Amino acid sequence: MSGTANGSITLTVEGSNKATRLPLLHGSIGPAVADIRKLYGDLGVFTYDPGYGATASCESRITYIDGDEGVLLYRGYPIEQLAEHSTFLEVAHLLLNGELPNRAESQSFERGILRHTMLHEQIRSFYNGFRRDAHPMAVLCGVVGALSAFYHDSLDINDPEHRRISAFRLIAKMPTIAAWAYKYSIGQPFMYPRNDLGYAENFLHMMNGVPTESSYVNPVLSRAMDRILILHADHEQNASTSTVRLAGSTGANPFACIAAGIASLWGPAHGGANEAVLKMLGEIGHIDRIPDFIARVKDKNSNVRLMGFGHRVYKNYDPRAKIMERTCHEVLAELGIKDDPLLDLAMELERVALSDEYFISKKLYPNVDFYSGIILKAMGFPTHMFTVLFAVARTVGWISQWKEMIEDPLQRIGRPRQLYIGPTQRDFVPMEQRG
C-alpha cells in the first residue's frame, strides 16, 4: 500500500501569479508529507533542506521511529518486544520479508544463512594485502566491496532469486569478514565458522576461539551479543542507509552498495559514537571530576560535548538505551565485574545529567551508544572493533532497505539539487593578463 493523498498545501510565489497545490501524503503512521515532485515544474523553485532532515526520500514499510515519544518499530513490532523475545536471525527474516517466520520458515531461513557463512578461500589471502595495523573498518570496506569479484552468480539485481542469494551471502559472511579482520590485526589464525552454532554465538567463536583449544561461548554473552545485533539491525533512513539506497539507485551491485554503507558508518558522528563515549569517560577519569566536566559541557565557549546523550531523531529516551542498560548489568554480573570504575562513572554521569535542568530542557537523554561501549569493552572487544560490530548488525537493515528500493516501482536514480552560491559566468583570462 502506498501513501494515501488527503488534503493539500497551496504555495504561491509572492509578487507573481504562480501557484501550485502540493498533495499531502499520509502513511500508516507518523506525520504527513507534502509531495513536492511537481514544485519545480509549476513554480520554477527547489526546496532547500541541508542534511535532508525535513525531507522524505522514499516510501518504506521497514522501520518507524517516533523521536518525540521514544518509539522504534521494526515492521510494526516494538524494539523492546523483539529484543526480549526474538533472535537476531528471526529479526533478520522480519526485516527482509515483512513477517516473523513460523517454525518451518525459520528453519529454512537459518539453513539458507548457514550455507553461506564461509568465504571463498582466495579471500583469505586477500587479507595479506593489508597492513597489520590497518583499521578493521578499512579492511571491512575493502573485503565487502571485493565480494562482487568472487560471487558473479548473484549480481543481477532485477532477478528476485539473485537478490535473495545476495542477501543471504551478505548477512552470513559479514561476521566471518569482521572476525577475520580482528584476527589478522592481532596475528592469530583465522577461525572458520561453525554451522552448529547460532549467529551471535558463531561470531564470538570466530572472534575469541583459537585452533589449539576447544571453543566455548558463554550463553549469557552470546545472548547479549544477539540483543546488541537486534538493537542495531535497522534505524530508518540514517546516513549509512541513505548511502546504500543512493548507491543502489544507480543499479550498482549489492556488495558495492553495502561497502558504501560501511564507509558512511565509519564516520565518528554515526557509527563511532560508542567509542567516543569510552574516550569521554576515560578523559573524565573519576566521579569527583564530573561536576567540572558538566560545567565545561555547559560552557558555550568550550568544545566539550556530552557523548552518548541526545540523538538526531530521538527527543526522548532512546528505547534501545533501556534494553542496553539492563544487558550491561547482566554482562558485568556474568563476568564477575562488581565494582567497575567505568560503569560507576557512567551511572553517576547519567544521574547528574538527568537531574540537571540544563540537560532536561534540551531533552538530552542517554542513547544506545552510552551503554554499548561499556558492554563491548567488558566482553573484551577493542574499541576499534566497535564500529565493525555495528556494521555486522546493520547489514541486515541495509540489505532489506536495498531490496525494498529495488522493488519500488517509483524508484529513480538519486539526484539531490543544490543552492549554488559560487561565481556567475565569467570569461577565461590568459595567464599573462592575470594580476
Image (tube, helix red, strand yellow):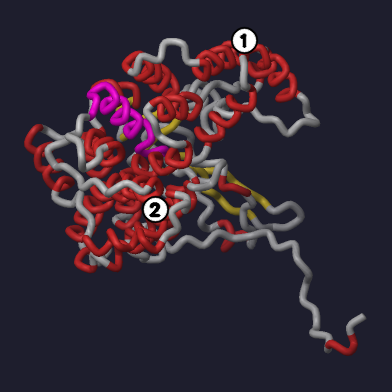
Give yes or no for contact between labels 1 and 2 (Cβ–Cβ under 8 Å).
no
Is 361 above or below relative to 253? above
Asked which secondary structure carries label 1, the reply is loop
Is 302 above or below relative to 340? below
Using the image as rendered, state which of residue 358 and residue 75 is in the foreground.
358
Residue flagged by tag 1: what amino acid is it? Ser
Furthest residue toward front: 212
Highlighted magenta segment, given as a residue range = 217-235
Residue 211, image x, y percentages:
21, 43
Answer few, some or many: residues within 10 Å of disc 1's Cα (few below 14, many 20 plus, some between 14 and 19): few
Residue 243, image x, y percentages:
46, 53
The C terminus sits in image quarter: bottom right
> What is the number of the mark on residue 140?
2
Looking at the rendering, which quadrant does residue 349 occupy? Answer: top right
Using the image as rendered, state which of residue 124 and residue 58 is in the foreground.
124
Is 174 above or below relative to 343? below
Residue at 26 percent of width and 41 percent of height = 206
